[in-house]
Protein backbone atom coordinates (compact mmCIF):
# COMPACT_ATOMS: atom_id res chain seq x y z
CA UNK A 1 0.00 0.00 0.00
CA UNK A 2 1.31 3.45 -0.96
CA UNK A 3 1.04 6.62 1.13
CA UNK A 4 1.93 10.01 -0.24
CA UNK A 5 2.02 13.33 1.62
CA UNK A 6 2.39 16.67 -0.15
CA UNK A 7 2.02 20.36 0.50
CA UNK A 8 0.79 22.98 -1.95
CA UNK A 9 -0.28 26.61 -2.13
CA UNK A 10 -3.71 27.86 -3.12
CA UNK A 11 -3.76 30.10 -6.18
CA UNK A 12 -4.20 33.68 -5.08
CA UNK A 13 -6.85 34.21 -7.73
CA UNK A 14 -9.09 31.61 -6.13
CA UNK A 15 -8.01 31.94 -2.50
CA UNK A 16 -11.01 34.04 -1.50
CA UNK A 17 -13.55 32.12 -3.52
CA UNK A 18 -12.35 28.58 -2.97
CA UNK A 19 -14.90 26.41 -1.28
CA UNK A 20 -13.32 23.58 0.69
CA UNK A 21 -16.70 21.82 0.64
CA UNK A 22 -16.53 21.47 -3.16
CA UNK A 23 -13.10 19.83 -2.98
CA UNK A 24 -14.33 17.63 -0.17
CA UNK A 25 -17.40 16.50 -2.11
CA UNK A 26 -15.44 15.50 -5.25
CA UNK A 27 -12.77 13.85 -3.13
CA UNK A 28 -15.25 11.91 -1.07
CA UNK A 29 -16.98 10.58 -4.18
CA UNK A 30 -13.83 9.67 -6.11
CA UNK A 31 -11.85 8.40 -3.17
CA UNK A 32 -14.62 6.07 -2.02
CA UNK A 33 -14.73 4.64 -5.56
CA UNK A 34 -10.94 4.30 -5.80
CA UNK A 35 -10.25 3.01 -2.29
CA UNK A 36 -8.31 6.11 -1.29
CA UNK A 37 -8.20 7.23 2.32
CA UNK A 38 -6.30 10.14 3.81
CA UNK A 39 -6.47 13.60 5.23
CA UNK A 40 -6.63 17.04 3.66
CA UNK A 41 -5.85 20.07 5.78
CA UNK A 42 -6.41 23.57 4.45
CA UNK A 43 -5.64 26.78 6.29
CA UNK A 44 -6.84 29.25 3.68
CA UNK A 45 -3.38 29.46 2.13
CA UNK A 46 -1.77 26.05 1.98
CA UNK A 47 -2.97 22.50 1.61
CA UNK A 48 -1.36 19.56 3.35
CA UNK A 49 -2.69 16.24 2.17
CA UNK A 50 -2.05 12.56 2.72
CA UNK A 51 -3.49 10.01 0.30
CA UNK A 52 -3.10 6.29 0.65
CA UNK A 53 -4.32 3.23 -1.19
CA UNK A 54 -3.24 0.82 -3.89
CA UNK A 55 -0.19 1.99 -5.84
CA UNK A 56 -2.06 2.63 -9.11
CA UNK A 57 -4.99 4.37 -7.42
CA UNK A 58 -2.66 6.73 -5.55
CA UNK A 59 -0.76 7.54 -8.76
CA UNK A 60 -3.97 8.29 -10.69
CA UNK A 61 -5.43 10.38 -7.88
CA UNK A 62 -2.23 12.36 -7.37
CA UNK A 63 -1.95 13.06 -11.12
CA UNK A 64 -5.50 14.46 -11.06
CA UNK A 65 -4.77 16.57 -7.99
CA UNK A 66 -1.53 17.88 -9.52
CA UNK A 67 -3.41 19.02 -12.62
CA UNK A 68 -5.91 21.04 -10.55
CA UNK A 69 -5.49 24.75 -11.26
CA UNK A 70 -6.69 25.79 -7.82
CA UNK A 71 -3.28 25.16 -6.30
CA UNK A 72 0.38 25.15 -7.35
CA UNK A 73 3.89 24.44 -6.13
CA UNK A 74 3.16 20.90 -4.98
CA UNK A 75 6.03 19.44 -2.97
CA UNK A 76 6.00 15.77 -1.98
CA UNK A 77 7.04 15.55 1.67
CA UNK A 78 6.79 11.80 2.02
CA UNK A 79 6.18 8.88 -0.33
CA UNK A 80 6.30 5.55 1.42
CA UNK A 81 5.14 1.99 1.41
CA UNK A 82 2.85 1.28 4.37
CA UNK A 83 1.83 -2.15 5.61
CA UNK A 84 -1.66 -0.94 6.48
CA UNK A 85 -3.68 2.25 6.16
CA UNK A 86 -2.76 4.91 8.69
CA UNK A 87 -5.76 7.11 7.91
CA UNK A 88 -8.70 4.74 8.03
CA UNK A 89 -11.12 7.12 6.37
CA UNK A 90 -11.19 10.11 4.12
CA UNK A 91 -11.40 13.37 6.02
CA UNK A 92 -10.77 17.05 5.68
CA UNK A 93 -9.99 19.71 8.26
CA UNK A 94 -10.29 23.39 7.53
CA UNK A 95 -8.67 26.05 9.62
CA UNK A 96 -9.89 29.50 8.67
CA UNK A 97 -7.09 32.01 8.09
CA UNK A 98 -6.05 34.02 11.12
CA UNK A 99 -5.40 32.85 14.62
CA UNK A 100 -4.45 29.23 15.21
CA UNK A 101 -7.59 27.33 16.08
CA UNK A 102 -7.34 24.85 18.97
CA UNK A 103 -10.37 22.95 17.64
CA UNK A 104 -8.67 22.41 14.28
CA UNK A 105 -5.50 21.22 16.01
CA UNK A 106 -7.53 18.80 18.11
CA UNK A 107 -9.22 17.46 15.02
CA UNK A 108 -5.89 16.97 13.23
CA UNK A 109 -4.44 15.21 16.26
CA UNK A 110 -7.38 12.80 16.30
CA UNK A 111 -7.42 12.19 12.55
CA UNK A 112 -3.67 11.55 12.42
CA UNK A 113 -3.40 9.56 15.63
CA UNK A 114 -2.60 6.30 13.87
CA UNK A 115 -0.16 7.80 11.38
CA UNK A 116 3.59 7.22 11.69
CA UNK A 117 5.16 9.73 14.12
CA UNK A 118 6.87 11.82 11.43
CA UNK A 119 3.70 12.04 9.33
CA UNK A 120 1.62 12.91 12.39
CA UNK A 121 4.23 15.49 13.37
CA UNK A 122 4.03 17.09 9.94
CA UNK A 123 0.26 17.56 10.26
CA UNK A 124 0.39 18.78 13.85
CA UNK A 125 3.27 21.14 13.16
CA UNK A 126 1.46 22.58 10.18
CA UNK A 127 -1.75 23.09 12.17
CA UNK A 128 0.18 24.77 15.01
CA UNK A 129 2.12 27.06 12.71
CA UNK A 130 -0.86 28.08 10.60
C1 LIG B 1 -5.89 20.48 -2.55
C2 LIG B 1 -6.74 19.57 -3.35
C3 LIG B 1 -6.92 18.26 -2.95
C4 LIG B 1 -7.71 17.38 -3.69
N1 LIG B 1 -7.85 16.08 -3.27
C5 LIG B 1 -8.56 15.22 -4.02
C6 LIG B 1 -8.68 13.86 -3.65
O1 LIG B 1 -8.18 13.40 -2.64
N2 LIG B 1 -9.41 13.07 -4.46
C7 LIG B 1 -9.99 13.50 -5.59
O2 LIG B 1 -10.62 12.71 -6.29
N3 LIG B 1 -9.90 14.77 -5.96
C8 LIG B 1 -9.20 15.65 -5.21
N4 LIG B 1 -9.12 16.97 -5.58
C9 LIG B 1 -9.93 17.41 -6.72
C10 LIG B 1 -9.28 17.05 -8.02
O3 LIG B 1 -8.20 17.92 -8.27
C11 LIG B 1 -10.32 17.16 -9.15
O4 LIG B 1 -10.93 18.42 -9.15
C12 LIG B 1 -11.38 16.12 -8.98
O5 LIG B 1 -10.82 14.85 -8.76
C13 LIG B 1 -12.27 16.06 -10.21
O6 LIG B 1 -13.25 15.11 -9.95
P1 LIG B 1 -14.50 14.93 -10.92
O7 LIG B 1 -13.92 14.71 -12.29
O8 LIG B 1 -15.20 13.74 -10.36
O9 LIG B 1 -15.29 16.20 -10.79
C14 LIG B 1 -8.34 17.85 -4.86
C15 LIG B 1 -8.16 19.17 -5.26
C16 LIG B 1 -7.37 20.04 -4.52
C17 LIG B 1 -7.19 21.46 -4.97
Image (tube, grey):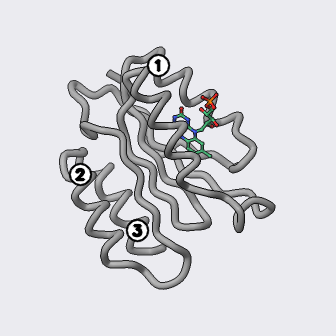
Q: Does the residue labelled 1 lie within 8 Å of ligand 1?
A: no
Q: Please name the residue that numbered disc 2 is placed on.
A: 117
State how far apart marks 2 and 3 are (Cα). 15 Å
- Mark 1 residue element: helix
Q: Is the residue 9 above or below the residue 82 in the image?
A: below
- Mark 2 or 3, which is nearer the eye? 3
- Taking 82 as reference, is 35 left or right? right
Seen from the viewer's position, the closer of residues 3 and 78 is 3
Q: Which residue is drawn at 35% across and 69% down?
A: 104
Q: Which residue is drawn at 43% across and 21% down?
A: 33
Q: Please name the residue that numbered disc 3 is placed on.
A: 127
State how far apart marks 2 and 1 are (Cα). 24 Å
The quadrant of the picture showing ligand 1 is top right
N-terminal label among 2 and 3: 2
Residue 57's label in the rendered image is 1
Q: In which quarter of the image is the N terminus?
A: top left
- Mark 2 residue element: helix
- Taking 19 as reference, is 89 left or right? left
- Mark 2 or 1, which is nearer the eye? 1
**Residue lying at the far right of the rendered structure:** 13
Q: Name the quadrant containing residue 123.
A: bottom left
Query: Badge 1: how crowded within 10 Å, few (<14), some, or many (20+)?
Result: some
N-terminal label among 1 and 3: 1
- Taking 13 as reference, is 49 left or right? left
Number of labelled discs? 3
Query: Badge 2: how crowded within 10 Å, few (<14), some, or many (20+)?
Result: few
N-terminal label among 2 and 1: 1
Q: Is the residue 41 above or below the residue 101 in the image?
A: above
Amino acid sequence: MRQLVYISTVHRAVATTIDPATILAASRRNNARDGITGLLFFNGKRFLQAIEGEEAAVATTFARIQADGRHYGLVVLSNREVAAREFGEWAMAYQPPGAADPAALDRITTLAERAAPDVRGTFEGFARAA
